[in-house]
């Protein structure tokens, strides 16, 4: 296949799949929200509400586009495009499968394969989006966590997990926790949706946007969620690897069945991760701003540094193949952190023996 | 009431134990609660009623305050004696009665015209309370709709037809001993 055609096809595929996925994630989100709140959610458009995304799309397209008189027209028009574009570009380095066999060789299922700074690229682009501006810097403390993996190239990261059969989630629980929290913040979803507070406030930065331009903001939000979910799966849950049904395969004996299994496993894992994000959105209340800040500065960054320290020690003194010791050490570190946090936290609740205040009447 | 009154019950905020302060326990608790609701809805125990296809269930339709009806007596005559008590009790002034000499032996007056503006009505049930002969009652019909204002002004014939339509499901309260016990039956 010619060198320019291959990335073009892959890019087209990724964009098309993402568009469809996002449209249906909105439906899934509404359904999950409804079920958690003892409701049924959209169920009138098509069976089980399956045509709802089309109806929403049609509505967005046909609504009136309003540009406020005082707005800077160029910037106003560029903003949603920019946000959507940056959200999409992050997918360039994210593998959506492993390899597929093609005319004796193989094709890597990544739009821009073998990018050695893949992970940094995602963080950099992710923080370009306006969504990321407030909290995105936060995610930057993640990168320490990944020194352990020995690579920032996502295909390599997955391959290493697949080869050892250990998912980094088990070996690096502390990094996983930090990443999950920062990931939620990065995608500005509850419990970290402070820039939006979409349940009770007018949505700040996209107040004046109408019709499809507003839709693009919502679109970008869901793209960010997919990005975070895929990244979590790739970094901590073995990417396309699953013991037995989707094992590691050397590039020379890749089969179509194996390739499809890899894609399926990655997709299922990602969907489960997305479901988890939706689940916590409807379970936990939002953080207050000072709580967010104290958590970021007093908990997340120290944890990141601690994790770095533990990893460095492990890398230096442990046999690279000794995953069990790393695993035990990792979970011990998590347990210690949680216990320390609990012990040092001020006891909640007022003292029990305070007699009722007596006011003069 | 004084602050040290014996009747005041002082509730103290429960102290968080070690597991509570570890954050993880309460967080998982939250997830478990929402998961329980999600599963129960998936099993079909949700609150939603698919309205046009599925009629909602009332606890007791006899005490529901929906569209009015004018009751008939055993001979099929309107029970109303045009005493105006309902129109007087009505806080929304939506009942308009024109009484005239009754053609029957057992009462002096009967309503020549009995009109209720269903759009004006606030469905408080005061007319039903006021009626000395249990002639006006509120039924469990709740989905009243109309294409025009005129359509929503119910005259005597319409109100009597509501009686015909609902008497099977909702017996007259005077005979039933009322929907709720203690309701004064004539």
Image: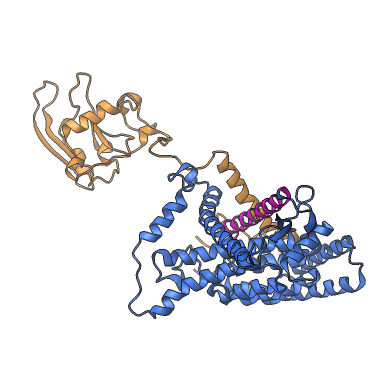
Does residue A119 appear left or right of residue B63 in this picture? right
Give the quadrant of the N terminus of chain A.
bottom right
Residue A247 image offset from top left, x and y in percent: 78, 52
**Which of B95/A263 is in front?**
A263
Which chain wears orange?
Answer: B
Can I make out residue A92 in this image? yes
Which chain wears blue?
Answer: A
Identify which residue is drawn at 79% across, 65% down: A172
Identify which residue is drawn at 43% across, 46% down: A45
Can I make out residue A248 in this image? no
Asked where in the image residue B19 lies, by quadrant, the reply is bottom right
Identify which residue is drawn at 53% across, 55% down: A20
Residue B33 image offset from top left, x and y in percent: 62, 50
Q: Please say whether residue A119 is one of the residues in the magenta stretch.
A: no
Give the magenta part as a residue range: A257-284
Does residue A325 appear left or right of residue B171 in this picture? right
Q: Please say whether residue A272 is one of the residues in the magenta stretch.
A: yes
Numbered disc total: 0
Q: Is the residue A319 above or below the residue A259 in the image? A: below
Identify which residue is drawn at 38% across, 33% down: B61
Residue A188 image offset from top left, x and y in percent: 57, 68
């Amino acid at each position: 296949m010619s060198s320019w055609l291959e990335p073009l096809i892959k890019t087209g595929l990724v964009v098309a799949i993402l568009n469809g996925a996002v449209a249906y994630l909105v439906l899934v989100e509404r359904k999950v929200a409804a079920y958690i709140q003892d409701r049924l959610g959209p169920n009138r458009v098509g069976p089980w509400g399956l045509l709802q995304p089309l109806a929403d799309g049609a509505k967005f397209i046909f609504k009136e586009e309003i540009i406020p008189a005082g707005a800077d027209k160029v910037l106003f028009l560029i903003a949603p495009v920019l946000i959507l574009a940056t959200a999409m570009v992050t997918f360039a380095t994210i593998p959506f499968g492993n390899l597929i066999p093609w005319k004796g060789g193989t094709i890597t299922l990544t739009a821009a394969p073998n990018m050695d700074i893949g992970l940094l690229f995602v963080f950099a682009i992710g923080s370009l989006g306006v969504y990321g501006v407030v909290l995105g810097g936060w995610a930057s403390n993640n990168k320490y966590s990944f020194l352990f993996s020995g690579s920032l190239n996502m295909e390599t990261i997955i391959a290493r997990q697949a080869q050892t059969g250990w998912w980094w989630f088990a070996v690096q629980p502390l990094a996983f926790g930090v990443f999950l929290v920062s990931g939620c913040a990065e995608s500005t979803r509850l419990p970290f949706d402070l820039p939006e507070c979409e349940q009770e406030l007018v949505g700040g930065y996209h107040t004046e946007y109408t019709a499809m331009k507003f839709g693009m903001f919502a679109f970008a939000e869901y793209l960010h969620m997919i990005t975070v979910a895929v990244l979590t799966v790739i970094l901590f849950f073995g990417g396309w690897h699953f013991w037995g049904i989707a094992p590691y395969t050397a590039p020379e004996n890749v089969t179509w069945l194996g390739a499809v299994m890899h894609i399926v496993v990655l997709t299922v894992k990602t969907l489960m991760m997305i479901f988890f994000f939706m689940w916590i959105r409807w379970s936990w209340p939002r953080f207050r701003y000072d709580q967010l800040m104290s958590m970021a500065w007093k908990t997340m960054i120290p944890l990141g540094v601690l994790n770095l320290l533990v990893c460095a020690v492990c890398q230096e003194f442990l046999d690279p193949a000794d995953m069990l010791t790393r695993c035990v050490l990792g979970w011990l570190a998590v347990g210690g952190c949680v216990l320390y946090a609990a012990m040092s936290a001020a006891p909640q609740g007022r003292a029990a023996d305070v007699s009722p205040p007596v006011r003069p009447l | 009431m004084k602050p040290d009154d014996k009747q005041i019950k002082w509730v103290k905020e429960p102290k968080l134990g070690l597991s509570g302060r570890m954050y993880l326990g309460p967080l998982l608790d939250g997830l478990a609660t929402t998961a329980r609701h999600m599963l129960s809805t998936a099993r079909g125990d949700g609150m939603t009623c698919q309205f046009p296809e599925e009629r909602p269930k009332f606890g007791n339709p006899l005490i529901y305050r929906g569209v009015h009806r004018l009751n008939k007596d055993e001979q099929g005559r309107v029970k109303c004696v045009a005493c105006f008590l309902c129109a007087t009790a009505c806080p929304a002034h939506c009942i308009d009665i024109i009484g005239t000499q009754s053609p029957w032996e057992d009462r002096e007056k009967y309503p020549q015209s009995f009109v209720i503006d269903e759009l004006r009505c606030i469905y408080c049930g005061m007319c039903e309370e006021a009626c000395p002969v249990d002639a006006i009652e509120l039924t469990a019909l709740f989905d009243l709709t109309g294409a025009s204002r005129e359509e929503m002004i119910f005259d005597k014939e319409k109100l009597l037809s509501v009686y015909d339509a609902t008497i099977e499901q909702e017996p007259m309260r005077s005979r039933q001993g009322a929907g709720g016990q203690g309701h004064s039956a004539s």
